[in-house]
Each structure stands twice: as structure tokens, then as C-alpha cells.
């Protein structure tokens, strides 16, 4: 890597700092509006797979809007959220004082108890080693028989998102759909499916990945 590339990486901002600023400026509400269609589709898809009462966690929960949607569902025993931006967690707790929201940095943070359903929207590609985190998520975050539903707008097949790392000056891991699916399979997940939601001109839509952790080796 040349000197310019090294300098650029060293001067990149942390994603949590950007999202913290967005929380303080009210942009988190715009994120909720912008992602609502995709998240509704994601929850509808995954809840068709979960046939019993469930516990859930939202990775990159922001102001907690998905956690609150999950909490309102009849079959949801409990739902919690994790985010690395302190202002986001503060806002989530102000909106939902009785909710469970944790401030933590991935990949180091992990929940005290595994859950039946993992949801994450627009979070995992900010990690420097997202494929390694898929293994951690499989091993430490999800109960056997559980499901993960992951949504992301930044991926190789969506060229409209390719300039985001430069425009925001934030690291993003640009993976293809097949690379994400292979990463899930390598981690141990089965029944892996992908969908693209909200496609329109010059926008390939949100990439949605569904994956299952089997009770036993399948």
C-alpha cells in the first residue's frame, strides 16, 4: 500500500462517531424512515421461520426503533439492542426507559445470554473483519435453532453505495452477495437465503440475508 493509502486509512473516522453526531442532530429519525420498508420486509421474512416465542437482539440498534417494534410483538419474550454510539444509546433509553440497551464495540462486546433471533440493519459492513464476526455471532450470540436476518445497503452489486466510504471518510467492507453467503456458511449457518428489497433505478435495494443455526449438525 502506498503512503497516500496508509494516510487515508489512518485518518478515517470511526463509524460510531459519525452515528453519534447523527443522533445528536436528529438524523436517526431519518434513518428510521429510510430503512423502515426494508426492516419490515426483513422482520416479516424471519418471523415466518420462527415458529415459537423468541428472544431477540438488534445489532446496531441506533435509537432503538427496531427493538421497540420487536417488543410489541405478541411472541417476543424480550428484545434488546447494542450500539457503539453513546448518543444513540442515550436516545434509545430516553425513548424506552424500561428497554435493554447496551453500549458496546464490536467485535469485542457480546451478550450475556444467546438469543433466538438476531436482527441487524446497516451495521456489519463497518467492521474491519465482518466474516470473522459472523463466526462469533454464530457461536456466542445465537441459540441452536435460531435465525439471523441481516440487512445492508453497501455491497458490491449496489454501485450507488460504492462512494460512501470516501464521502463519509469511514471504513466499510465491500463484499459481494456471494461472499456474504459464503461467510455465513463458513461460520456454520445453514438454510442461507438472500433477497434484495426496494430496488429502483440506480439502486439495487437492501441486501437481506437469512441464516439458520441448526440444533445439530445438518
Image (cartoon, rainbow, N blue to C red):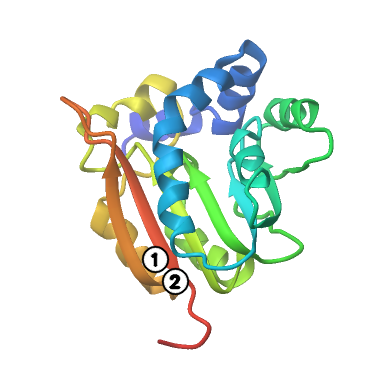
Is residue 63 shown left or right of residue 134? Answer: right
- State the residue in front, 169 or 66: 66
Dot 2 corresponds to which residue?
A: 187
Q: Residue at x 42, y 72 (%)?
A: 189
Q: Position of residue 52 (x, y in %)?
A: 59, 68
Q: Residue at x 52, y 26 (%)?
A: 32
Residue lying furthest left in this view?
201
Residue shown at 45%/57% (left/top)? 46
| Placement of 137 over or under 209, stated as above or below | below
Asked if the residue under mark 1 is in contact with the one under mark 2, i.e. CB atoms within 8 Å, the reply is yes
* Image coordinates for residue 195, horizontal then vertical, percent: 28, 50
Question: Observer-nearest residue: 51 or 142?
Answer: 51
Viewer-proximal residue among 47 and 110: 47
- Expressed as whole percent of the image width and height from the top left, the position of residue 37 reads 40, 33
For marks 2 and 1, give the CA distance: 5 Å
Residue at label 1?
A: 184
Task: Give the structural element (helix, strand or loop) at label 1.
Answer: helix
Give the vertical position of 135 relative to 27 (above or below): below
Which numbered tag is attached to residue 107?
A: none
Q: Residue visible at 43% across and 24% down?
A: 34
> In the structure shown, which secondary structural element does the residue marked by tag 2 occupy?
helix
Q: Is residue 7 visible?
A: no
In this rendering, position of residue 18 left or right of residue 42: right
Q: Is residue 105 above or below residue 204?
A: below
Q: Quadrant of the N terminus?
A: top left
Q: Is residue 30 visible?
A: yes
Amino acid at each position: 500500500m502506498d503512503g497516500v493509502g496508509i494516510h487515508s486509512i489512518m485518518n478515517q473516522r470511526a463509524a460510531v462517531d459519525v452515528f453519534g453526531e447523527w443522533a445528536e442532530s436528529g438524523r436517526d429519525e431519518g434513518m428510521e424512515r429510510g430503512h423502515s420498508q426494508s426492516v419490515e420486509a426483513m422482520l416479516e421474512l424471519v418471523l415466518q421461520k420462527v415458529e415459537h416465542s423468541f428472544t431477540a437482539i438488534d445489532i446496531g440498534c441506533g435509537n432503538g426503533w427496531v427493538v421497540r417494534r420487536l417488543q410489541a410483538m405478541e411472541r417476543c419474550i424480550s428484545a434488546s439492542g447494542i450500539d457503539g454510539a453513546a448518543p444513540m444509546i442515550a436516545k434509545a433509553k430516553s425513548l424506552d426507559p424500561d428497554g435493554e440497551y447496551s453500549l458496546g464495540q464490536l467485535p469485542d462486546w457480546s451478550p450475556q445470554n444467546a438469543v433466538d433471533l438476531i436482527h441487524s440493519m446497516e451495521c456489519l459492513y463497518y467492521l474491519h473483519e465482518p466474516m470473522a464476526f459472523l463466526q462469533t455471532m454464530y457461536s456466542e450470540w445465537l441459540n441452536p435453532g435460531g435465525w439471523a436476518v441481516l440487512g445492508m445497503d453497501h455491497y458490491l452489486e449496489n454501485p450507488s453505495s460504492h462512494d460512501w466510504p470516501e464521502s463519509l471518510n469511514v471504513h466499510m467492507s465491500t463484499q459481494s452477495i456471494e461472499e456474504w453467503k459464503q461467510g455465513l456458511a463458513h461460520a456454520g449457518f445453514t438454510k442461507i437465503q438472500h433477497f434484495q428489497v426496494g430496488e429502483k433505478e440506480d439502486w439495487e435495494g437492501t441486501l437481506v440475508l437469512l441464516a439458520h443455526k441448526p440444533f445439530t449438525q445438518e
